[in-house]
Image: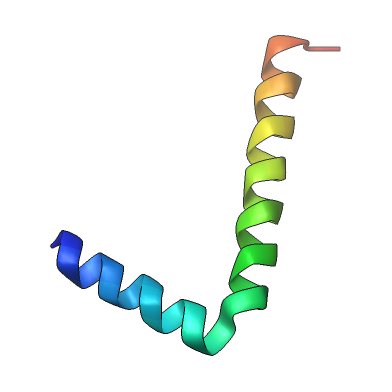
Amino acid sequence: MEEFISRIIDFMKSEYGDFLMIVMCLVFVAFIVMIFNKKTPE
């Protein structure tokens, strides 16, 4: 299973390298924002 995932990641890097990095960063930022919103309910 890990080999399959690493194969997909390698394919993504070769095909959509920069796009994938941008998407991952956006998801990471959104995740952090959600956590902060839950910690400090206004």
Q: Is 40 in front, or is 29?
A: 29
Compared to 5, does 28 lie above or below? above
Q: Position of residue 14 (x, y in %)?
A: 49, 86
Q: Quadrant of the C terminus?
A: top right
8 to the left or right of 41: left
> Where, quadrant-wise, is the N terminus in this rendering?
bottom left
**In the drawing, does residue 14 fall left or right of residue 17?**
left
Number of labels in the image equals 0
Colouring style: rainbow
Closest to the observer, 31 or 11: 11
Residue drawn at point x = 52 percent, y = 89 percent: 15
Residue 21, quarter of picture: bottom right
The single residue placed furthest to the left in the displayed view is 1
Q: Residue at x 67, y 53 (%)?
A: 25
Vertical order, 28 against 33 (above or below): below
Q: Residue furthest bottom?
A: 15
The image quadrant that residue 6 belongs to is bottom left
35 relative to 7, above or below: above
The image quadrant of residue 41 is: top right
- Measuring 74% from the left and 32% from the top, which residue is drawn there? 33
Look at 26% across and 66% down and name the residue there: 5
Image position, residue 30 (x, y; %): 70, 43
Query: Residue 32, position in %: x, y?
Result: 68, 32
Depth check: give the residue in front, 32 or 12. Answer: 12
